[in-house]
Image (cartoon, rainbow, N blue to C red):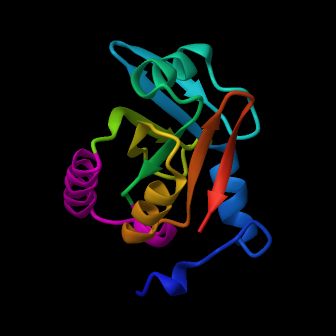
């Protein structure tokens, strides 16, 4: 599927995707501690502190390479995509921490992603497009927000 076919914005996003992504718990792992981020809520101070400490910038991102186009993929495919995402982040010299994207209703498998310490939207947007994602999350000082492709 072409990246152009995946272009979605907040107005045109299917309601089920918007509802599912908005309800998801985006759990960021900083060392041995987990911090939960939610759409339209202020991120935990520890998450923002890590982003500032590592990048010197006030905002970061949460992205996954799992389940392209919002459709379940085999575990082997998701693992391969994660490896490719990590290589791309390393190539851009972007600091990252593991995340888990958890459906509170348990209808969708846990996705593995990355919290990224960077304010570079262009790079994150390009990576989300490359890995055929419908959206990614902006982690800003006053809220976490969905960013649709």
Q: Residue 22 appears at what percent x and percent y?
A: 69, 48
* Residue shown at the point (26%, 60%) measured from the top left: 81
User: Which residue occupies the foreground of this view, 140 or 26?
Assistant: 140
- Does the magenta portion include 144? no
- Does the magenta portion include 90? yes
Q: Give, as a single range, the part of the protein colored magenta.
A: 67-92
User: Which residue occupies the foreground of this view, 7 or 122?
Assistant: 122
Q: Quadrant for residue 135, please give it.
A: bottom right
* Image position of 60 with respect to 22: above or below: above
Q: Residue 139 appears at what percent x and percent y?
A: 60, 36
* Residue shown at the point (34%, 12%) measured from the top left: 32
Q: Residue 121 appears at what percent x and percent y?
A: 53, 53
Which quarter of the rendered picture does the N terminus lie within? bottom left
* Image position of 101 with respect to 98: above or below: below
Q: Residue 31 appears at what percent x and percent y?
A: 33, 15
Which quarter of the rendered picture does the C terminus lie within? bottom right
User: Which residue occupies the foreground of this view, 57 or 100?
Assistant: 57
Characterize the magenta stretch by its predominant secondary structure: helix
Residue 130 located left or right of residue 56: left
Q: Quadrant for residue 23, please give it.
A: top right
């Amino acid at each position: 599927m072409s990246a152009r076919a995946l272009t979605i914005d907040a107005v045109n996003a299917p309601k089920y995707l918007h509802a599912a992504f908005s309800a998801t718990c985006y759990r960021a792992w900083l060392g041995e501690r987990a911090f939960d981020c939610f759409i339209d809520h202020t991120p935990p101070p520890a998450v923002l502190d890590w982003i500032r400490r590592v990048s010197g910038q006030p905002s970061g991102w949460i992205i996954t390479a799992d389940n392209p186009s919002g459709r379940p993929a085999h575990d082997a495919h998701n693992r391969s995509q994660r490896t490719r995402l990590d290589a791309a982040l390393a190539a851009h010299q972007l600091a990252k921490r593991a995340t888990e994207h958890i459906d509170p209703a348990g209808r969708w498998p846990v996705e593995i992603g990355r919290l990224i310490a960077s304010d570079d939207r262009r790079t994150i947007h390009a990576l989300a497009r490359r890995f055929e994602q419908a959206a990614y999350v902006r982690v800003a000082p006053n809220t976490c927000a969905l960013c649709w492709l």
